[in-house]
């Protein structure tokens, strides 16, 4: 604040005219632009994180090829599978084109997410399955999407007629589809290129994905109707889709920690923390929801989301480098988030207890109890991360699995409340 006043005073001494006022106004606008509401569609959010993952992977492959850094291939493969699952579950966008969000598609997306999560957590758990899935998603998917773009009447030919931003859309989609096929081939035949050459290809692919993300942002701003997923089938909001994924994440993590603690399976704690950070980032970017509560979806929140994603991606790919820092960060976020939300839940209830009793619908009582349990479990998990051996490893697995099941139950309650609201509106 003092710096800004000094600039104004100096400016007034030098030039009290319009140029100086324009200078101050321009700097004020730049200062507050980061706090303005961000208009970043969900598809652009997912693509931007996928692009950042590819860019970081490309950069890290250079020191990896020189033997300067360790490399956890399964962490990258699992992360990419989770990104594909995110698109399928939240948007109905598959590697082979847009589809109606049916129950079957939701199951397919959940299975791919489960394979990706387990691939991150347990080295070589599924052997060649992750590579085969990525070959299908990148290779076959890129080829089919390229054919659709070239021959579908509402795509390339229509875009060419409209011109403008649609030329960038053609360039972005075409380059992503072609490079996707190349990446699929490189995943299956790693010896096709040297590691530095592969790093360059991954960097170019990452840049193309980020470019497409921001082209789509402009398209959806100009044509909001284009952002809507296909109607019909399962209706899940972004928040509900993330609840589903987080529930699945927690259940798998909790279940896998049981054989891990019994010495029956290897485990990558680095990838576990990294994937959790990426999930946090998606929530922050998509809706402004953070581990410590919701915030306005400003460009500041978007920037923090990208930072969380970058930290998580590095932790997935490079083992153990960020584990001490992320352990403390995730532990504190879980404790603070649980305590803050718990306070928001309990304080209104204490006030109501001093008022005349009013019958409350059973579904709201269940909602309150579910949120209460979730926040207590979150605080227990956070505490176990900060204080080693405070809670036995097997108990931590049970806590996480319970957390996941409670998240899925919360999703069920929210869908029931949503249906009740729709029925009430229909009657009115």
Image (cartoon, rainbow, N blue to C red):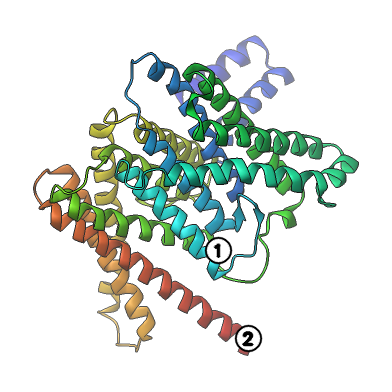
Residue drawn at the location 66% of the way across and 36% of the way down = 176
Which image quarter: residue 349?
bottom left
Question: In this figure, which residue is indicated by the disc labeled 2?
Answer: 426
- Report whether residue 193 is seen: yes
- Report whether residue 39 is seen: no
| Location of residue 233 with respect to 116 vertically, above or below | below
Q: Position of residue 346 (x, y in %)?
A: 27, 68
Which image quarter: residue 342?
bottom left
**Front one among 292 and 234:** 234
Neighbor class of circle 2 (other Cα within 10 Å; few <14, some 14-19, many 20+) is: few
Report how far apart the C-alphas of labels 2 and 1 lie in the structure.
29 Å
| Location of residue 344 with respect to 74 vertically, above or below | below
Q: Does 94 sit left or right of 369 as displayed?
A: right
Q: Position of residue 357 (x, y in %)?
A: 30, 87
Q: Assign a secondary structure to mark 1.
A: helix
**Front one among 225 and 255:** 255
Question: In this figure, which residue is indicated by the disc labeled 1?
Answer: 105
**Front one among 30 and 55:** 55
Neighbor class of circle 1 (other Cα within 10 Å; few <14, some 14-19, many 20+) is: some
Badge 2 or badge 1: first in the primary sequence: 1
């Amino acid at each position: 604040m003092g710096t800004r006043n000094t600039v104004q005073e100096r400016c007034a001494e030098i030039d009290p005219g319009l140029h100086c006022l324009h200078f101050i106004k321009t700097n004020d606008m730049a200062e507050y632009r980061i706090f303005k509401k961000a208009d970043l569609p969900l598809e652009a959010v997912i693509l931007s994180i996928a692009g950042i993952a590819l860019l970081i992977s490309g950069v890290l492959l250079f020191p990896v090829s020189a033997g300067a850094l360790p490399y956890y291939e399964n962490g990258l493969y699992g992360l990419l599978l989770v990104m594909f699952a995110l698109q399928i579950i939240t948007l109905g966008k598959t590697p082979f084109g847009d589809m109606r969000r049916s129950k079957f598609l939701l199951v397919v997306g959940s299975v791919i997410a489960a394979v990706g999560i387990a691939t991150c957590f347990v080295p070589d758990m599924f052997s060649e399955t992750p590579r085969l899935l990525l070959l299908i998603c990148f290779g076959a998917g890129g080829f089919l999407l390229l054919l659709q773009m070239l021959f579908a009447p509402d795509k390339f030919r229509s875009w060419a007629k409209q011109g403008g931003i649609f030329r960038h859309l053609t360039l972005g989609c075409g380059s992503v589809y072609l490079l996707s096929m190349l990446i699929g081939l490189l995943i299956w035949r790693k010896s096709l290129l040297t590691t530095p050459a592969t790093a360059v290809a991954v960097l170019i692919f990452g840049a193309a994905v980020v470019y497409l993300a921001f082209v789509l942002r402009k398209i959806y701003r100009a044509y909001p109707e284009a952002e809507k997923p296909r109607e019909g089938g399962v209706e899940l909001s972004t928040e509900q889709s993330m609840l589903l994924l987080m529930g699945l994440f927690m259940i798998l993590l909790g279940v896998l920690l049981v054989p891990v603690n019994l010495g029956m399976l290897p485990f990558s704690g680095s990838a576990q923390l990294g994937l959790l950070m990426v999930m946090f980032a998606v929530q922050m970017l998509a809706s402004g929801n953070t581990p410590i509560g919701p915030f306005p979806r400003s460009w500041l929140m978007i920037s923090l989301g990208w930072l969380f994603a970058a930290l998580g991606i590095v932790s997935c790919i490079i083992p153990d480098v960020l584990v001490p820092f992320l352990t403390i960060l995730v532990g504190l976020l879980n404790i603070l988030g649980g305590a803050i939300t718990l306070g928001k839940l309990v304080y209104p209830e204490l006030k109501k207890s001093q008022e005349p009793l009013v019958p409350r619908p059973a579904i709201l009582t269940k909602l309150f109890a579910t949120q209460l349990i979730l926040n207590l479990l979150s605080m227990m998990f956070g505490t176990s991360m900060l204080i080693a051996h405070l809670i036995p490893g097997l108990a931590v697995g049970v806590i996480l699995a319970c957390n996941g099941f409670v998240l899925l139950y919360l999703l069920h309650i929210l869908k029931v409340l949503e249906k009740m609201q729709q029925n009430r509106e229909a009657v009115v």
